[in-house]
Amino acid sequence: MTLEKEFIKKGINKNQLEDFFEREYPRAGYTGCDIQRTPMGVKITIYADKPGLIIGRGGGRINEITQKLGEDFGFEDPQIDVQEIEKPELDASIMAKEIKNAIENNANYRRVASGVLRSILRRGAAGAEISISGKLSGSRGRTERFQDGYMKSCGEPAKRLVDKAVEHAKTRPGTIGVKVKIMKERPDEGLKKEDKKTEETTEERKFELTEDKLNEILDSSISEGKEKIKKLEGDLQLENYKKILDYETDFKNRKGMLKFLESKIKELEEDE
């Protein structure tokens, strides 16, 4: 089998698996799954708003899932992991299903959409947009949009930060489409977080002049010691040079090294 056909086959299997979980657990708030193939077998992680409905009492339904996956999809002894969605209001799939179910139960679509929109923003989303299309009233179809907050419709931030989902509600007049878009954070907030991570990483990587490093420098000859110090110039601070000087004075007291270190300290003090 060619590489292209293998990718297509895996994609079809993933879609069939998604449909299977959707049918099996309509009330669990299923949002998606991940398939990881390991040397030990296949690990399937299921994400849901109500994982208890999938797991069952005492984990009793896990065996049923494992058996069905083996029979229907050919997975041999798959490892099943069910994860709860921490903030369901920020998951577009869960919110779209909530609106769909409410519409199918004859709830007023305006009231439902407005309530869901408020819930999304209360949970910290930067913005959200809900589109409902179909025969909402009367004989002609139309689309109504409910939007609040900040929303990007195109470009890299839209791909990275906007979660989208579509559901279809079956009603007597016909099918009603529900589309939910949630922007979890503003692009500048994402940049601030990246900057913060970079600062934390820089702090974590801050150079530390350990006793082993000091011994390595001082146990060398004067010329070798100078070379090692020069290689560390980008990391060494004023207090590091003073520490090396103290060690040199106490344990070696070599004039050439003392003079070299004193000149470095003087340069740094003048720069400050």
Image (cartoon, helix red, strand yellow):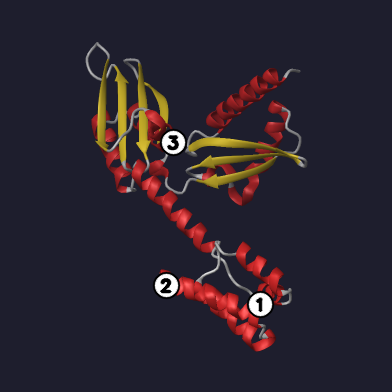
Asked whether 109 or 151 is in front, the reply is 151
Outermost residue toward the bottom in this view: 250
Numbered mark located on residue 160 in the image:
3
Front of the two marks 3 and 1:
1
Numbered mark located on residue 211 in the image:
1
Q: Residues within 10 Å of mark 3 (few under 14, many from 20)?
A: few
Front of the two marks 2 and 1:
2
**Going by the image, does 169 lie left or right of 52?**
left
Circles 2 and 1 in contact, beta carbons < 8 Å:
no
Query: Is 240 situated above or below 163?
Result: below
Asked whether 232 or 221 is in front, the reply is 221
**Going by the image, does 221 lie left or right of 193?**
right
Rendering coords of residue 52 (x, y %): 54, 47
Rendering coords of residue 181 (x, y %): 36, 32
Three-letter code, disc 1: Glu
Q: Secondary structure beneath disc 3?
A: helix
Three-letter code, disc 3: Arg
Outermost residue toward the top in this view: 139
Circles 2 and 3 in contact, beta carbons < 8 Å:
no
Q: Residue at x 63, y 74 (%)?
A: 210
